[in-house]
Amino acid sequence: MADIFYIGMDLCSDFTQLSYYNDIKREPESVSQLNNKETYLMPNILFYSTDTEHWYVGGEASEARFNENGTVVDGIFENIGSDERVNIAGREYTYQELFMMLVKLHIDSFLYRYEAAEIKKLVISVDDFNVQIFQLLSRLHKDMGIPKECVEITSHLDSGLYYIFNQPTELWNNSVALYDYSADGLNYYRIDISKNKDPKAITVTHEDYTEQMSLSKYGNDTYQMDLDFAKIGEYESKKAYISAVFLTGVGFSNKWMKKSTNVLCQGRRVFVGQNIYTKGACYRAVGGEYRSFYDEYFVETKENVLSDIGISLDDEKDTFVPIINGGSQWYNTHGELKVILDDTDKISLVYKNHKTGEEKRETVKIHGLPKRPNKTTKVSLEVEFDSPHEGAVIIRDLGFGKLFPTTNKIYRKEFSI
């Protein structure tokens, strides 16, 4: 019988982390390197051995490069948009092909540890939305031979929320602070929970401190870095009552925090971990009870859609029928609605702010439809987004069975909300 795995993957430019759901412990467990059980950060490098004609990834690639003849491939993320080709052992590869190989080998290096292993769900967490990376990862299921619905792509922020809200309730009774100190610098997120309002909401406020704090700015001067971070921590802690602080990112990997630790620990618990995003992605992969906060709360972040979009039936009750509901990342928000037109060639679109209830309406006239008897024209309405606030409603003529074939006409109504 095959081992079934729910996997969370944190895919960064330099390192990748994996975690899987441990049914016995009922929580995600980080995956260590095969050749170093103390390390969970797997470097994003590939090595092709001409001795064995074999590809290595991560820690195994780092080790094999010193023991075997071959070619090291790094800088894959930095060159993801390049048209350059890399010649390895007489074959040319694009950086896009190498990227997909890297991701797949990271996953396979874990699955190979079991005689029979299957992926039930894989959630990949990335730092920021990148069109090319998103498009490449969207076809990963084909390369791995698994159903499309088995792979999801999400963000660090979304994974962070999944991790935080699957911790003991007392840690998020009030606001929660998340500091992410990556190679690019420091970002701060304050998560506020509105429990007694309708709708219940989780609001994330983002502060960009990358200009004030970055690893390249300080070099070896950890004393000044500690002082500057203490000031930021003190300033942010005055804005809200914070139950817990979570610290993640390579910037927090060394023991330089002294004064700042005293500031952050005043009346609250502080957690430091490099595996917050991979474990959060794993919680999302499992779903069920672990995504209950998304069902109970409306989540408002810089990357989430804040409005419900649908149509009005223009009846006495002015019935609203949603095409999509807000509260998820714009690039993961999709919806489709099929309607039969009743003596009309117009559709009333409604954009309803989920938080405030404010509405924006517009009527779309569908030009060029053939003359058909009433209630014999079916159309589909699809919503796609280009950002959290901009996108389009796609209207397709579906006809009405064999009696009234489709014209294949497609209408696009762009919106800004």
Image: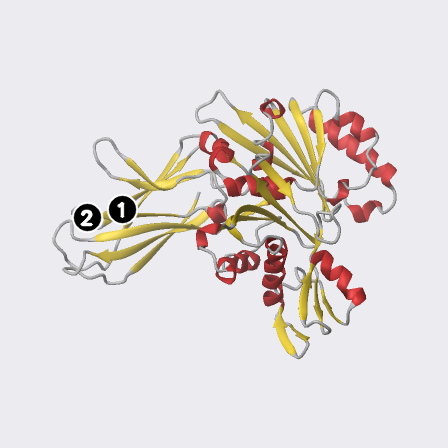
Question: Could you say where residue 334 lies in the image, as x and y percent from the top left?
Answer: 41, 48
How many numbered markers are drawn? 2
Above-or-below relation of 176 to 20? above
Badge 2: residue crowd in 10 Å (few <14, some 14–19, many ≥20): few
Badge 1: residue crowd in 10 Å (few <14, some 14–19, many ≥20): some
Q: Amino acid at mark 1?
A: Ile
Between the C-alphas of marks 1 and 2, the distance is 8 Å
Provide the residue designation for mark 2. 344
Q: Nearer the viewer, residue 8 or 300?
A: 8
Q: Amino acid at mark 2?
A: Thr
* Secondary structure of residue under mark 2: loop
Question: Mark 2 and mark 1 in contact (Cβ < 8 Å)?
Answer: yes
**Residue at screen point 70% across, 38% down:** 273
Above-or-below relation of 248 to 384? above
Q: Is residue 225 visible?
A: yes
Q: Is residue 182 left or right of residue 407?
A: right
Provide the residue designation for mark 1. 347
* Secondary structure of residue under mark 1: strand
Choose top left, top right, bottom left or bottom right for residue 214: top right
Choose top left, top right, bottom left or bottom right for residue 134: bottom right
State how the image is colored.
Answer: secondary structure
Quarter of the C terminus within the rendering? top left
Question: Could you say where residue 339 lies in the image, as x and y percent from the top left?
Answer: 25, 47
Above-or-below relation of 195 to 103? above
Q: Is residue 253 left or right of residue 298?
A: right
**Residue at screen point 47% across, 56% down:** 146
Image mark for residue 5? none
